[in-house]
Image (cartoon, grey):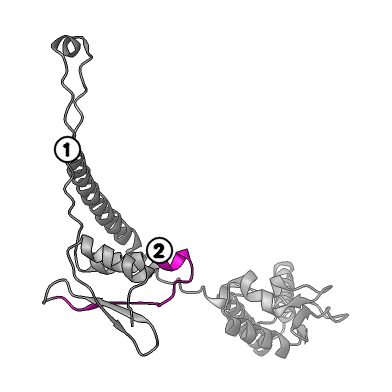
């Protein structure tokens, strides 16, 4: 059976141009296998072509496949091309012609471009290192020292009744914000005022109770003043007891004034009890 057709001719011609001999054989599928080996150390290359050509694309594909395998084996086509002879130039024409610019050869241009690319790459690497160092420095967060929390003021200095009203309800949740006390301190103060029947609490709100009719507000005294008044009352009681034991005499004008003063002081002590 003949192995030659248009496709095999194209493949064999490409291999002959590179000095390679091809071997042809039929496959079990009814196609033609073209095999070759560049050198014994290389692997055997194979190209399968059809026995009948379909269209012009099959010829192009066969040629491209063979050339691809040759390039994989590092095979290049070496063709001897005769250099064209330079035209002899007359001396006068050479003298009258413009000077030719100094053009750097392409290999030198490529080498210079590679050197510039290497310098640019080194600068980019240095820039990346600098940016990375700055980013790490900025990213390092030094936490601000935690300030010691101020101790809350004594709850005795805060009068809760000053933040409550008689004509409107006050939300209990807003009292810690307004007074500066803790919720536990607010709770204790409200409980104290409620036990003394001074406030009303309803659904998380509080207000002062109106004063009862006929009830006068008692004035609180300092403990030192209260003790002084107690001593004065005890002295007056002792004088009254001594006067009761002595014989009765008609009091003079000065003695009557003293007794009136003592009676007034007794009335003052009775009217201002100690709380």
Assess disc 1: are there few (<14), some (14-19) or many (≥20) residues with their C-alpha within 10 Å of its C-alpha. Answer: few
Determine the residue located farthest toward the left in the rendered image: 40
| Residue that appears at 40% across and 63% down | 60
Task: Pinpoint residue 270: horizontal percent, then vertical percent.
Answer: 73, 81
Residue tagged 2? 60
Is residue 20 one of those drawn in magenta? no
Q: Going from the N terminus, do you reach mark 1 or mark 2 first? A: 2
Is residue 45 one of those drawn in magenta? yes
- Classify 144 as above or below 175: above
Task: Pinpoint residue 143: horizontal percent, then vertical percent.
Answer: 36, 66
- Classify 235 as above or below 125: below
The label number, if any, that marks residue 117 in the structure image:
none
- Of residue 163 and residue 215, the one placed in the foreground of this image is 163
Q: For residue 213, which quarter of the picture?
A: bottom right
Asked if residue 123 lies left or right of residue 239, the reply is: left
- Does residue 145 appear anywhere in the picture? no
| Residue that appears at 29% across and 58% down | 132
Q: Secondary structure at mark 2?
A: helix
Task: Pinpoint residue 69: horizontal percent, then vertical percent.
Answer: 27, 69
Q: For residue 226, which quarter of the picture?
A: bottom right
Task: Pinpoint residue 59: horizontal percent, then vertical percent.
Answer: 40, 66
| Residue that appears at 39% across and 88% down | 29
The label number, if any, that marks residue 83 in the structure image:
1
Asked whether disc 1 touches disc 2, contact meaning CB atoms under 8 Å apart, the reply is no
Q: Secondary structure at mark 1?
A: loop
Q: Which residues are magenta?
A: 42-59
């Amino acid at each position: 059976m003949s192995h030659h057709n248009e496709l095999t001719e194209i493949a064999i011609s490409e291999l002959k141009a590179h000095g390679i001999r091809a071997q042809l054989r039929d496959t079990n599928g009814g196609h033609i296998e073209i095999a070759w080996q560049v050198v014994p150390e290389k692997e055997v290359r194979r190209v399968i072509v059809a026995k009948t050509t379909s269209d012009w694309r099959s010829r192009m594909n066969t040629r491209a496949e063979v050339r691809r395998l040759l390039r994989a084996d590092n095979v290049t086509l070496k063709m001897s091309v005769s250099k064209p002879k330079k035209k002899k130039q007359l001396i006068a024409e050479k003298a009258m012609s413009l000077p030719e610019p100094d053009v750097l050869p392409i290999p030198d241009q490529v080498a210079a471009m590679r050197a510039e690319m290497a310098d640019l790459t080194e600068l980019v690497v240095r820039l990346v290192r600098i940016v990375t160092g700055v980013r790490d420095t900025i990213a390092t967060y030094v936490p601000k020292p935690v300030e010691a929390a101020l101790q809350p003021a004594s709850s005795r200095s805060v009068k809760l009744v000053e933040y409550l009203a008689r004509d409107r309800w006050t939300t209990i949740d807003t009292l810690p914000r307004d007074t500066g006390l803790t919720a536990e301190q607010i709770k204790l103060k409200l409980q104290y005022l409620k036990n003394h029947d001074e406030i009303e609490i309803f659904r998380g709100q509080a207000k002062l109770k109106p004063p009862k009719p006929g009830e006068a507000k008692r004035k609180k005294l300092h403990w030192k003043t209260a003790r002084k008044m107690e001593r004065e009352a005890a002295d007056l009681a002792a004088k009254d007891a001594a006067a009761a034991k002595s014989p009765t005499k008609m009091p003079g004008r000065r003695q009557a004034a003293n007794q009136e003063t003592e009676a007034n002081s007794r009335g003052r002590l009775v009217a201002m009890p100690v709380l």
